[in-house]
Image (cartoon, rainbow, N blue to C red):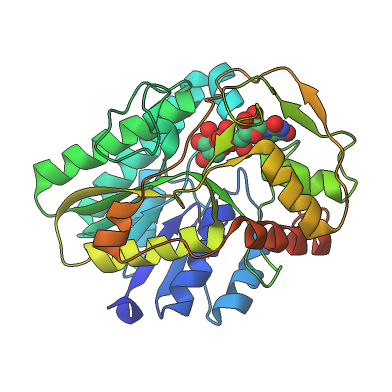
């Protein structure tokens, strides 16, 4: 099925998008990327083509712009869309709430409207475990309550899920999959593509990786008094290649179907901040020194997935462990200490 699909990736120059583009091409699909490069670099494109072995059609457009999207859909025959494009910095979403609601919701609604106008029937949406908020007891299941998000970024993911679900119900012709990512880390094992956040990374792994190359002065652990075995927060880290493959499986599932289905994409295993730092120290061969800092506002002590639904319905299961995640991250970061050429 997949080797005949032409798939549009909005935000396809980003971390998850670029890895998904490669895995889609490896599975036989053709890829079109729309990205306004607000938080990514076009220099990833030749590397995506190098790894995927195919040309990529690239459109430097904003998904909030209906005319730009119409022009793309008129020029390209698109079978399905994977919607990655969106602002994703949690702290920034608190200080720039309206920008996040405007951008992340307009892009989703605009995309759905233009897809409908051009007869594009299938969408996979990049959602996040952050929609579960802090009231659910792990392992987190798709039927648990969502929406008690601790920040506007999470709320935009929750609201986008509802918009897509209700659009699928209303139109009766749309097939949609919502993928709730847990904590994506790692890089393609080639070391040619990886995570390259702008500025000082908010997330643990890119920060640790940059600290290991000497690009960051100090490594701080945010809080060591949580109700966990070593006092630091526990998360379900998932290899970005496993996550990318989940998108391939999601497309294979939804093409030919209508309605809306939601899946957790995690490993089901939780690792603490200290366990991750230990694993990364092993991967990079350095004894990474850290200091404890106060808790970070909004952090939830423990989050990890029940991903049995994805295994059952998508035939997908994470295969790479925390050591592989750290080894592949280190290969990317040590080969590209300053990330992509800007
Ligand atoms: C993990 C743990 C930090 C940096 C967020 C978003 C989620 C998704 C992934 C976008 C926490 C601690 C971190 C550091 C540290 N984002 N930490 N020192 O918060 O689980 O999830 O990123 O799609 O939606 O909510 O991930 O990596 O930021 O933090 O101690 O220098 O590492 O406090 O306990 P998080 P994270």
In this rendering, the count of numbered labels is 0
Does 148 appear above or below 138? above
Quadrant location of the N terminus in the rendered image: bottom left
Q: Residue at x 87, y 44 (%)?
A: 215
Where on the image, by quarter, is ligand 1? top right
Q: Nearer the viewer, residue 112 or 302?
A: 302
The part of the image, by quadrant, that contains residue 329 is: bottom right
Vertical placement of residue 145 versus 321, above or below: above
**Seen in the image, is 198 located left or right of residue 254?**
right
Residue 79: tell me if it is visible: no
- Picture layout, residue 125 above or below residue 323: above
- Residue 30 on image: x %, y %: 42, 75
> Looking at this view, is 321 or 126 the one in front?
321
Can you give x and y, in whole percent of width and height, for residue 244 in the image? 47, 62
Q: Is residue 90 visible?
A: yes
Residue 40, given in percent of the width and then of the height, sits at 63, 50
**The quadrant where residue 175 appears:** bottom left
Asked whether, in this view, residue 6 is left or right of residue 275, the answer is left
Q: Please tell me whether residue 250 is drawn above or below residue 46 in the rendered image.
A: above
Q: Residue at x 32, y 74 (%)?
A: 5
Q: Residue at x 41, y 81 (%)?
A: 28
* Snapshot quadrant of residue 249: bottom left
Q: Residue furthest front?
A: 229
Q: Residue at x 44, y 29 (%)?
A: 154
Residue 225 on image: x %, y %: 66, 19
Q: Nearer the viewer, residue 326 or 195?
A: 326
Viewed as shown, does residue 146 lie left or right of 242? left
Q: Nearer the viewer, residue 310 or 247?
A: 310
């Amino acid at each position: 099925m997949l080797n005949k699909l032409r798939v549009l990736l909005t935000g396809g120059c980003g971390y998850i998008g670029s890895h998904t583009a490669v895995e889609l091409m490896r599975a036989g699909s053709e890829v079109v990327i729309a990205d306004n490069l607000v938080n990514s670099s076009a220099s990833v494109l030749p590397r995506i083509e190098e790894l995927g072995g195919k040309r990529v059609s690239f459109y430097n457009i904003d998904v909030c712009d209906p005319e730009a999207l119409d022009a793309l859909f008129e020029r390209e025959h698109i079978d399905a869309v994977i919607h990655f494009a969106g602002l994703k910095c949690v702290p920034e979403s608190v200080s720039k709430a309206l920008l996040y609601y405007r951008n992340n919701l307009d892009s989703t609604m605009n995309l759905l409207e233009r897809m409908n106008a051009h007869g594009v029937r299938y969408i996979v949406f990049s959602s996040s475990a952050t929609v579960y908020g802090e009231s659910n007891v792990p392992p987190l299941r798709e039927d648990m309550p969502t929406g008690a998000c601790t920040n506007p970024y999470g709320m935009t993911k929750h609201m986008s899920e509802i918009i897509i679900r209700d659009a699928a119900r209303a139109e009766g012709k749309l097939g949609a999959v919502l993928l709730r990512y847990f904590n994506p880390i790692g890089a393609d094992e080639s070391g040619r593509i990886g995570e390259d956040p702008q500025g000082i990374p908010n997330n643990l792994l890119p920060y640790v990786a940059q600290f290991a190359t000497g690009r960051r002065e100090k490594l701080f652990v945010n809080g060591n008094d949580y109700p966990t075995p070593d006092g630091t927060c526990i998360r379900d880290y998932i290899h970005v290649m496993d996550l990318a493959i989940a998108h391939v499986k999601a497309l294979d599932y939804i093409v030919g179907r209508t309605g809306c289905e939601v899946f957790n994409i995690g490993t089901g295993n939780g690792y603490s901040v200290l366990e991750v730092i230990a694993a990364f120290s092993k991967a990079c061969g350095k004894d990474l020194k850290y200091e404890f800092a106060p808790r970070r506002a909004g952090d939830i002590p423990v989050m990890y997935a029940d991903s049995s639904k994805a295994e059952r319905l998508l035939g997908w299961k994470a295969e790479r462990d925390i050591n592989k995640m750290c080894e592949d991250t280190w290969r990317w970061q040590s080969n590209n200490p300053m990330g992509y050429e800007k």
